[in-house]
Amino acid sequence: MNRAILVRGACAVFLATVGCSQQGPTIVSGTGGTQGAGGTGPGTGGSSSTGGEVGSGGTTGTGSAGTNGTAGTDGTGTGGSTVTGAGGINGGTAGNVGTAGTSGTAGAGGRVGTAGTSGTAGAGGRVGTAGTNGTAGTNGTAGTNGTAGTTGKAGTTGTAGAGGGPTASSIVPTVNGYLWVGTCASGAGAKLDCPIVGDNNTTCPATYDMTTPYASRGVFQTHTHTVGGTAGQQYTVNLELRGILGGRCYNGGTIASPTVIADFEGSTGNNGWYSGGTPTDSKWNTYEIHVTPPVPGVTAFPSATDHTENVYFLNAFPATSAYCERHETFVMKYTTSLPVLGGGTIKMVMHDANCQAQQNCGGIDNQSTCATPRTVDLTGLSPQPTNPPSTQPYTENTFTPQWIFFNVRSVSTP
């Protein structure tokens, strides 16, 4: 019976009847035989036989290593009954393990080639000569004008959107930024005064005559402004006024500043606002505002019987101060409110009974010449004066007249 014998050590494993032997140190490589196909299981295990002797190791045969066969599937076998047998006698002495063969010498690598040298850059071509400009062509003959198209019809004006509150530009556009100058005429002045003429004449209509009623004596300079907005709607024009005016006495109304300020001759600025009443009979000039029609509920009337208008004055001093009619001009700086009605008028009147107005001379009333006219700071007011004269100190016909500047700070409704 053929038996498979397994010898542990440096021996190859062979199946079938070929024995395994060990021999000398030289290992000869052979081409391996083909590996047999694995057997299929299960098989019935045989009974154990008594072990035979181990044969002496044979020499290693020369042959090529076989190619690996396809592994057989593991068969599951029913184990045979175990038979106890006497151990065989060990055979001959195992052969010595052969000496491993030396490794082959690696082949020498090829030489690294020498890097090629860079090619020489080619020389650049010459820059060509710029061509000459061609001759400009002559202009062609102008075409004849085509017939003008007919003018399209103007579009209708859109309905104004609902605006915000009233503004200076919509209610009193000609008052905001208005520079009111007490115009000096040409001719000879009288020391600190300049000659004044009225709206419709070039000379004073008469000498100062106390027998002529004051209301028609001397000259009047007037400037009229129309109130915008909704007709009959009440508006309050909030003003800031700055300028140089001579003081004046009024009666029958209400003064805004009943006492003289400490710096009344300096640059701090006086408040000359006076509501209602009339001027005293005097040769000193007035600065007046007449509002028509009168605003309901406003009692700034000229008198108890005259309710045709509301009247205000701009250059009042307290009657008890001794400065309301003094041969001197003063700095005015104050804010006030002026009630008006939409569609009404604001008429500004300067009345001078003797046709001589005080100049802006800048000093007290005992100076001999008009040598130091004052200027007033208008910083922060917008718009700035645009109507002439435009540079301070304002001058006209070699004189330095009185003046007052209007700045509308806001417009409101009740």
Image (cartoon, helix red, strand yellow):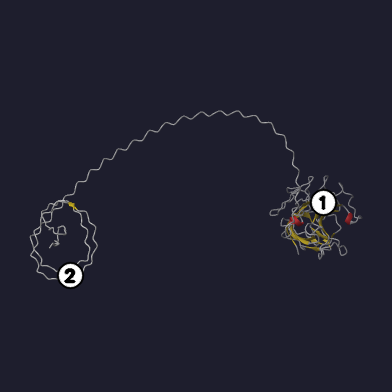
Amino acid type of disc 1?
A: Ala
Mark 1 vs 2, N-terminal side: 2
Q: Position of residue 326 (x, y in %)?
A: 80, 56
Q: Amino acid at mark 2?
A: Gly
The reply to whether residue 241 is visible in this rendering is no
Q: Residue at x 74, y 42 (%)?
A: 149
Q: Is label 1 in a helix, a strand or a loop?
A: strand
Question: CA–CA distance between discs 1 and 2?
Answer: 154 Å
Q: Quadrant of residue 146?
A: top right
Q: Is residue 76 above or below residue 25?
A: below
Q: Nearer the viewer, residue 184 or 152?
A: 152
Q: Quadrant of residue 11?
A: bottom left
Position in image of residue 282 (x %, y %): 85, 56
Residue identifier under label 2: 80
Query: Which-is-in-front pick, marks 1 and 2?
Result: 2
Observer able to see residue 355: yes
Along the viewing direction, whichever of 134 and 27 lies nearer the viewer: 27
Q: Position of residue 14 (x, y in %)?
A: 16, 58
Query: Label 1 crowding class (10 Å Cα cut-off): few <14, some 14-19, many 20+?
Result: many
Circle 1/circle 2 CB separation < 8 Å: no
Q: Residues within 10 Å of mark 2 (few under 14, many from 20)?
A: few
Residue pointed to by mark 1: 357
